[in-house]
Image (cartoon, helix red, strand yellow):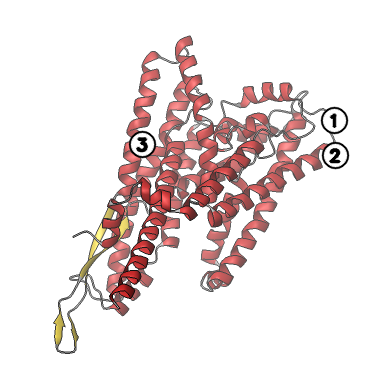
Amino acid sequence: MASAAEQLARNLNFSTFAKAKVLQQRILFTVLALLVYRLGTYIPVPGIDPDAYAQSFENASQGIAGMFDVFAGGAVQRMAIFALNLIPYITASIVVQVVSSASPRLEALKKEGESGRRKLNQYTRYLAVLFCTVQAYGIARGLEGSQGVVLNPGIFFQVSTVITLVGGTMFLMWLGEQITSRGVGNGISLIIFAGIVANLPGTVVETLELTRQGSIPAIWGFGIPLLAIIVIAVIVFFERAQRRLLIQYPKRQVGNKMFQGDTSHLPLKLNTAGVIPVIFGSSLLLLPATIASFAAQGDAPQWLQVTAAVLGRGQPLYILLFAALIIFFAFFYTSIVFNPTDTADNLKRSGGFIPGIRPGERTAQYIDFVLTRITVIGALYLTVVALIPELIHSQLNVSQFIGGTSLLIMVTVTLDTVSQIQSHLIAQQYEGLVKRSRLGGRRNK
C-alpha cells in the first residue's frame, strides 16, 4: 500500500504549484542567481589581449583546458573572472573530508552538530583560498609565458590576476551558499550544472560542423546523440536503483489491545555517493594538470612539459588515474554519508530488526556487507559512464565534447532539484490538509 507521502505526490499538479508562493520565490531567486553567474563568465580578466588569448586557447582546447572550460561554462575560453569556477573549493572540501576522517579532533567537530559544521566549513574556505591563490598564480605565469597574450607583464599583472580570480571563486562560493539556503537545490551543484548546460548549444553546433566537414565520420554525427540518450537512460536507472532491506517491528500491547508488528524497508541506494566521486576525481586531476598545461605553453622546464603531456585529456595515465579516483571516492564518500553502526543502533532503539539477523553489531555488519557489494556496482557504473567521453574524445578529438561525466552531473542535479521541488509541494499540500482539518474541527464544535 502506498504511503501518505506517495499518495500526495501522485496528486501534485499545476494548481498545487500555483499556490506555493514560497516555492515560486525560491525558484525565482535560483534563476536570478544563476543569471548573475552566467554574466560573470563574460567579464574578462584585465590586462589580456582577447585575440591573442583566443588563439592560445584554441591551441590548448583539445587538452585539459577544454575539459576545464566545460565545467566553467566557457569562462576559461574567455579567461573571465570566474575562470577557476568552484574547482578550488571542491578540492578543499575533498582534503578537509579526508583529513577529518583521520584526525580525531576534526572527527569530534563533525559530531558537535551545527557549530562543528560551521568550523569545518570555515577551514574549507581558508583552504580553498590557498588552493585558488596557487592556481591563479600559476595561470598568471602561464599567460605571461604565452606570446602576446598579456599586454603589460610583470608583478602588477600577476597580483591583479590572482586577486581577480580568487575574488571570482569566493563570490561563487558565497552565491552557491545563498542558492542552497534561499533557493532550490544544492547551490554548488547548480552552478556547475549551469556551466555545463551553457556549453550544450556550442557543442552541438561544433559536432554538426565537424561532421559536415568530414572531420568526424557521419555515423558519429548520429551515434553521439543516440549514445547520449542511452547514457541518460542508464544514469536514471542506476540513480533510482535501491536495495531494500526488510525491517520488522515486534508486536506491541497498548492497554488490553495487541497491535500487530509493522514492517518497513531500509532503502540503500546503489550509488549512495551520487555525482560526488566524479566531481572530486575531475577536480583533483584538473588542479595540477591545468597549471602544467598553461605553464608548458611558455618557457617551462622539461619535466613540466612532460607532466602536461602525460596528464593530457585522453592519455592512458589520465584515464587510469580518473578511474582510480572515482572508485576510491565512491567508497570513501559512501562511508562518510552512511554509517552502518549508527543505523543499526537506531533500529535497535526503535525495536526494529532485520529478519534472521541479531540486532546490534551483527546488524551493522550485515548492512555494511550489503552496502559494500552494491557500492562496487555503483562505483563501476560511475567509472564506465565517466570514461565514455574520454575514450570518444581520444578517438574523435572533439574539443568541447559533453559526454558521460557532464551528463551524469546534469541528470543527477536535475533529479535532486526536482525531488526538492516535489518535497516543497508535498509540504504545501500537508499544510493545506492541516488547515482544513483544523477548520473542520472548529465547525464541528
Cα–Cα span, label 1 and label 3: 47 Å
Residue occupying image coordinates x 50% and y 26%: 201
Residue occupying image coordinates x 66% and y 46%: 169
Closest to the observer, 394 or 119: 119
Q: Which mark is residue 152?
A: 1
Closest to the observer, 376 or 406: 406
Helix, strand or loop at label 3? It is: helix
The crowd level at tag 3 (other Cα within 10 Å; few <14, some 14-19, many 20+) is some
Q: Nearer the viewer, mark 3 or mark 2?
A: 3
Q: Amino acid at mark 2?
A: Phe
CB atoms of marks 2 and 1 within 8 Å: yes
Check the image and report above or below for 140 versus 147. Answer: below
Q: Amino acid at mark 3?
A: Ile
Mark 3 or mark 2: whose residue is earlier in sequence: 2
The crowd level at tag 1 (other Cα within 10 Å; few <14, some 14-19, many 20+) is few
Helix, strand or loop at label 1? It is: loop
Residue occupying image coordinates x 25% and y 74%: 352
- Answer with left or right where residue 187 lies relative to residue 387: right
Residue marked by disc 3 = 232
Quadrant of the rendered image containing residue 57? top right
Q: Amino acid at mark 1?
A: Asn
Closest to the observer, 332 or 203: 203
Helix, strand or loop at label 2? It is: helix
Position of the N terminus by quadrant = bottom left
| Residue 160 x %, y % | 80, 41
- Answer with left or right where residue 402 lies relative to residue 422: right
User: Is residue 163 visible in this depiction of the protein?
Assistant: yes
User: Is residue 274 visible in this depiction of the protein?
Assistant: no
Residue marked by disc 2 = 156
